[in-house]
Image: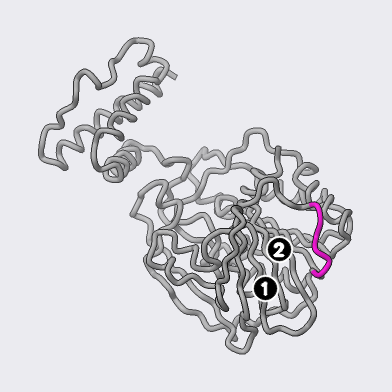
Amino acid sequence: MKEQHQHRLTMLTILLIYLVILTGTVLHFDVLQFPQMTVRSMLDGSYADAVERYLSEHLGFHDTLFRIKSETDLFIGEKMIQGVYITDDMLLEKLYSEELPAPETLAEPVNRYFEENGTPTFLLLVPSASGIYEGSLPANAVNAAQQQLIKETYAATETGVRCVDASHILSSLRNDYIYYRTDSHWTSFGAYSVYQNAIQKMGFTPVPYQRLVITHLSTEFRGDLYARTLYSEVKPDMLDCYAYERGSSVTSVTAYYADGTVQDRGNTLYDTSALETEDKYRFYLGAPCQKLVIRTNVENGKTLLLYKDDFADCMVPFLMQHFSEICIIDLMQTDPVPLEQAEDKYTQTLFLCSMKNWEMLFGA
């Protein structure tokens, strides 16, 4: 432990030297405010924490400071920044392995919903990229057995709940562009690949890939993992929009927010203004809200109740080809999560969530 704190202090020293080189000036600190070192504070790590806070608060270029610190960590052999592993090709989020919830606990919300409603119910848990690309992680990296936990959770669901094995599908396509390099989400192609299997389980024929028109919205997308690390050596991502020109069209989109506000979003799913922001992924469904109701010109009497996190956002354009209405409940925007009763008018229910968020929501 003592060696770890001394290592951090060494990093801070190197960081200060880098700052002097970059700015070409000597940095002047307020001696009275600069953290004072004691033997205890050095040994228990509190001194290193205090110095880092001081540097962050008193230097006027936080991003530059953080980027230099990250590069310093890599220079001295660290392979992880802010819980993100740095590899040659992509940034991969650390999956913590301590105190994993029981599969029965994770399956319970879906089981309870199915028992109370009897609606045809489907469960789709999406593994993190770290689980699919585990072989790319640094040696001795900590990585929870997420795919195994998904398998065990599926096994704990009630007979009648249909589960979609996204892990198997994505693992078989690991050499394709199924996850972003700088963001924790899957790509539109990753979502489409799993959609093909899911929609067949739900009784529909998937839209053929060759009939989709793909538009490249951005070739400079840097996502949430980049924001956590500011590591720019990994190639930026491409953000795509898939359209089925012979398919359904949206007739109305209505958003319901936690404060009771209702917003008419017209007849489009997409928020093109998001492409001019750092949060480009918001393009797919716009600003988060508790409930989003999408109506289409499909006239087959089929309706869907979708409980989701934002992994579902880029799959919704595919799902809307098969339903006259989709009611989306954002699990990350509701507290408590409303799983008690389904509205009678919805003919099917799909739970689509990243395993990371599902554990956070229902693992306690």
Magenta range: 340-345
In front here: 35 or 355? 35
Residue hosting label 2: 306
Nearest to N terminus: mark 1 or mark 2: 2
For the stretch drawn in magenta, what is the main secondary structure?
loop
Residue ranking furthest to the left: 25
- Mark 1 and mark 2: span between their CA atoms? 10 Å
The residue depicted at 48 percent of the width and 72 percent of the height is 240
What residue do we see at 56% from left, 81% from top?
243
Q: Is residue 355 visible?
A: yes
Q: Residue 6 location, x and y as percent?
A: 34, 21
Q: Position of residue 26 (x, y in %)?
A: 12, 32
Residue 344's image quarter?
bottom right
Question: Can I make out residue 175 in this image?
Answer: no
Foreground disc of the pair 1, 2? 2
Task: Indicate the quadrant containing the N terminus: top left, top right, bottom left or bottom right.
Answer: top left
Residue at the disc numbered 1: 319
**Image quadrant containing the C terminus:** top right
Q: Which residue is painted at 47% across and 79% down in the image?
A: 215
Q: Are marks 1 and 2 in contact (CB under 8 Å)?
A: yes
Residue 196 locus on image (x, y percent): 68, 73
Q: Residues within 10 Å of mark 1 (few under 14, many from 20)?
A: some
